[in-house]
Structures are given as C-alpha cells and as structure tokens.
Amino acid sequence: MKAAVVVFPGSNCDRDLAVALEAVTGTAPAMVWHRDTELPDGLDLIALPGGFSHGDYLRSGAMAARAPIMRAVADAAARGVAVLGVCNGFQVLTEAGLLPGALMRNAGLDFVCRDVELTVANAQTIFSARYDDGETIRIPVAHHDGNYVADAATLDRLEGEGRVVFRYSGPVNGSARDIAGIVNDTGNVLGLMPHPERLIEAAQGGTDGRRMFEGLLAALG
C-alpha cells in the first residue's frame, strides 16, 4: 500500500501517522508539505494528521483547507483514492468541503484528552472492515474543537446512508448524535476525531487502532 501523509505548519501527529502506517504496511509513507502542488504517483491512501495547523487561526483547519496541496487531495479523492483525516485532519476535510458539517468548540469549552469508547456504527467501509458492527473499541482523543455539528437534514442523510462510521459511546464533546467519524458519499474519505494511530502496539496500552490500518492494507494493499 502506497501512502502519503500531508504535513501542515502546526501538525504534531504527522510522525505518529507515519510510524503507524510503516508498522502495519512495512513501507514508510511519503511526507508531503502543504505548499506542494502535486502528490506522489500511484497513491492508495492520503492521510491528514492531527495537530493545530496554522495554530488554529481563524477556525481549526480553515487555512490548511486552502493550502496548495489540498487541490491535489480533492482531485485524488474524486478519483477514488482513500483519504483519512484524523482530528485536525477531520477539521480540514470539512473546511475543504470534502465532508459535510463542521467541527466546533467542545461543549464546556474544555480541551479533552483521554481514552474514549467508540461504537462501530458501520463496519462495511474500508476504514472499519476489521471491526464488527456494534463493537465497542477504545481510542484516545485530544481536541478542543471536536464538537461535530450539521443541520438536521444532513444528519438524517448521514444516518440513512450509513455514513456515520464511529460514535462516541458516551458524552465526550457535545457532538450531534455522538458522531465521532463519518465518510463521504462514496465511502473513500473518512474524517475521525479520535486518534487510531496512538493505539497500534500493546506498549501503547492497546491495539484497537491498529485494526483500522490493517483493514486499509487488506483493502488497498
């Protein structure tokens, strides 16, 4: 599986994603700078990491969404290339219009940094294929602006089309309908607030995150 990790000024989980991808696939991903205008040829997966791109200036992900490389990311997504946006990457995807809705300040205005339980709402995507429908998994979160919002019609459409992939099993940040991760209408773009790359080895306290990357390798490798 040929992957790339896009790096923005303020990204702080780009190395975490690169380490996770190499650990599972055996191949180090390309690291692509936000000012680049082209992606490497033949990519199977593009990953947008967590962090605080551009210091969360204006809105989280708003400036990164307009980086030169995002035109290439959008074109690749339209061709069916898989795109994974984690935490700030999810924010970038919504700001770029690749996913609906927006990520707002957490309810209570607190930064949330802890392990949380997620329910797998749809195990029929390339990102969730190694999980079971309804399974509860544990993945860390670390965000201040993770409160997913969308109008009622959008939320109903996401639910009806099976595009809610992961939900928080309990209150975390105020997200509408406890949404933690969604896919686009063709299922090749996932935005996810929790950090699967932080739980890929037993030494990290668990391996629930590893299965996401194993599933991607099986589907795309």
Image (cartoon, rainbow, N blue to C red):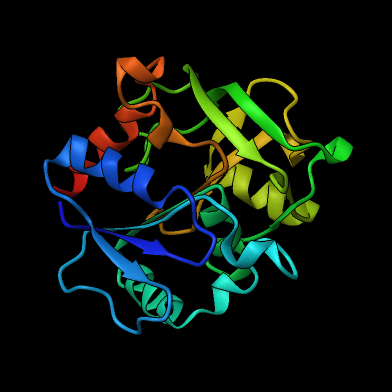
Question: Could you tell me residue 71's position as x and y percent?
Answer: 43, 81
- State the residue at coordinates (72%, 44%): 144
The one of 140 and 80 positioned closer to us in this rendering: 140
**Residue lying furthest right:** 108
The image quadrant of residue 97 is bottom right
Left or right of 5? Residue 167 is right
Count of marks, rendered view: 0
Question: Residue 212: image x %, image y %?
Answer: 34, 34
Instruction: Give the side of residue 130 with respect to residue 87, left or right.
Output: left
Query: Closest to the observer: 47 or 100?
Result: 47
Q: Residue at x 29, y 81 (%)?
A: 38
Residue 167: % across, % down: 60, 31
Could you tell me which residue is drawn at 56 percent across and 72 percent down?
65
**Residue nearer the viewer, 62 or 191:** 62
In this orientation, does residue 218 appear?
no
Which quadrant of the structure image shows residue 74?
bottom left
User: Horizontal placement of 186 versus 192: left or right?
Assistant: left
Q: Is residue 77 above or below residue 216?
A: below
Q: Position of residue 184 (x, y in %)?
A: 49, 57
Q: Nearer the viewer, residue 169 or 134?
A: 169
90 lies left or right of 178: left
Q: Is residue 122 above or below residue 43?
A: above
- Residue at position x 31%, y 15% from top? 202
The vertical placement of 210 against 205, above or below, is below
Is residue 195 among the parts visible in the rendering? yes
